[in-house]
Image (cartoon, grey):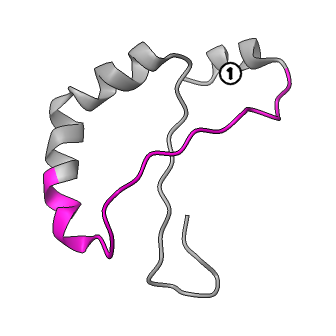
Amino acid sequence: MQSKEDPNLFTFYEAYMTEEGIKAHKETEQYLTWRETVADWMAKPREGMTFEVVAPEDIDSWKTLK
């Protein structure tokens, strides 16, 4: 997502069903390539954040979003 106030500020997010899914993603070639490619673009180090899903309330409905 790109900030409306600062067009140079972006937030990238991904949603995973499990911690194992996150771990598996971080071991993929495309993730490792992306991480290395954008390292110098970061104004500050990347930080992980966790959130609670509020919509859709039925988390099982996310399983169809592949």
Q: Quadrant of the N terminus?
A: bottom right
Say whether residue 44 is left or right of residue 1: left
Pointer 1 local density, CA inside 10 Å: few below 14, some 14–19, many at least 20: some
Q: Quadrant of residue 44?
A: bottom left
Q: Which of 21/51 is in front?
A: 51
Question: In the rendering, at what x and y percent does residue 59 appear?
Answer: 75, 18
Say whether residue 62 is left or right of residue 41: right
Q: Quadrant of residue 45?
A: bottom left
Q: Secondary structure at mark 1?
A: helix
Amino acid type of the residue tagged 1 in the rendering? Trp
Say whether residue 17 is left or right of residue 26: right
| Residue plotted at (51% across, 16% down) | 18
**Main structural element of the magenta stretch: helix, strand or loop?**
loop
Q: Which of 30/57 is in front?
A: 57
Residue behind mark 1: 62
| Residue plotted at (54% across, 72% down) | 2
Q: Is residue 5 above or below residue 19?
A: below
Question: In the rendering, at what x and y percent does residue 4 appear?
Answer: 64, 82
Q: Quadrant of the C terminus?
A: top right
| Residue plotted at (14% across, 45% down) | 33
| Residue plotted at (22% across, 62% down) | 38
Q: Quadrant of residue 31?
A: top left
55 drawn magenta: yes
Q: For the magenta stretch, what is the residue range?
A: 36-57
Question: In the rendering, at what x and y percent does residue 65 appear?
Answer: 62, 24
Q: Is residue 33 above or below residue 11?
A: above
- How many labels were placed on the picture? 1
